[in-house]
Amino acid sequence: MNNSIPTSLLEIHETQKPGFQPLIDSDCWRVAILSFAPDLTPQQLVEFQRHNESDEVFVLLSGRCILFLGEGDDSVTWVFAHNLEPFKLYNVRRRAWHAHVQSADAKLLIVENRNTSRLNSPRIDLSPHQREEIFELTRQLWGVHG
């Protein structure tokens, strides 16, 4: 008896690479894993991004992650922070400025439109004041700078 399931019925994907790794692209959506990378620390965070054509769903699988959301259209006028809880779904709305910091053991599941790219996802530099605000919010939520 052959227990090997054909890939036409089931695909299995995993990754141990750091950073954003798309794993499954469907007709309209993408599933990715975001693992810790050095640019995801409060010290290295330098920009917000937004996705003009897609909401983006985050699910914390392990470790810690703070999601920062920026209010404003052409610039970020106010920064909010939310400490993600494991296995809850967080839907960042289309056109919402956002960034995140992660602990070294963090892994997040991400679901977004398949066509999400730098072409439809502008970025905006954090000001020195906003970077200090990120440090302070991280300290308040985690007790340290990451």
Image (cartoon, rainbow, N blue to C red):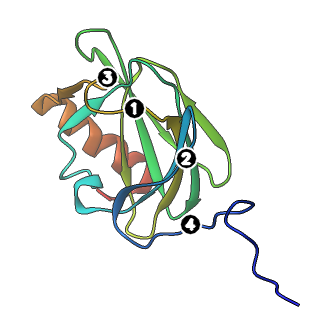
Nearest to the observer: residue 135 or residue 51: 51
Give the crowd class for mark 3: few <14, some 14-19, many >=20 residues within 10 Å. Answer: some
| Residue ID for mark 2 | 84
Q: Are marks 3 and 2 in contact (CB under 8 Å)?
A: no
**Which of the two discs, 1 and 2, labels the residue nearer the N terminus?**
2
- Residue 86 position, x and y percent, is 63, 55
4 above or below 51? below
Q: Are marks 4 and 2 in contact (CB under 8 Å)?
A: no
Nearest to the observer: residue 86 or residue 122: 122
Nearest to the observer: residue 119 or residue 103: 119
**Which of the two discs, 3 and 2, labels the residue nearer the N terminus?**
2
Element type where label 2 sits in the image: loop
Mark 1 to mark 2 CA distance (whole Å): 23 Å
- Residue 3 position, x and y percent, is 82, 84
| Residue ID for mark 3 | 120
Element type where label 4 sits in the image: loop
Q: Nearer the viewer, mark 4 or mark 2?
A: 4
| Residue ID for mark 1 | 116
Q: Residue 93: which disc?
A: none
Q: Residue 13: which disc?
A: 4
Element type where label 3 sits in the image: loop
The outermost residue toward the bottom is 1
Give the crowd class for mark 4: few <14, some 14-19, many >=20 residues within 10 Å. Answer: few
Which amino acid is tagged 3?
Asn
Mark 3 to mark 4 CA distance (whole Å): 26 Å
Which amino acid is tagged 2?
Leu
Mark 3 to mark 1 CA distance (whole Å): 6 Å
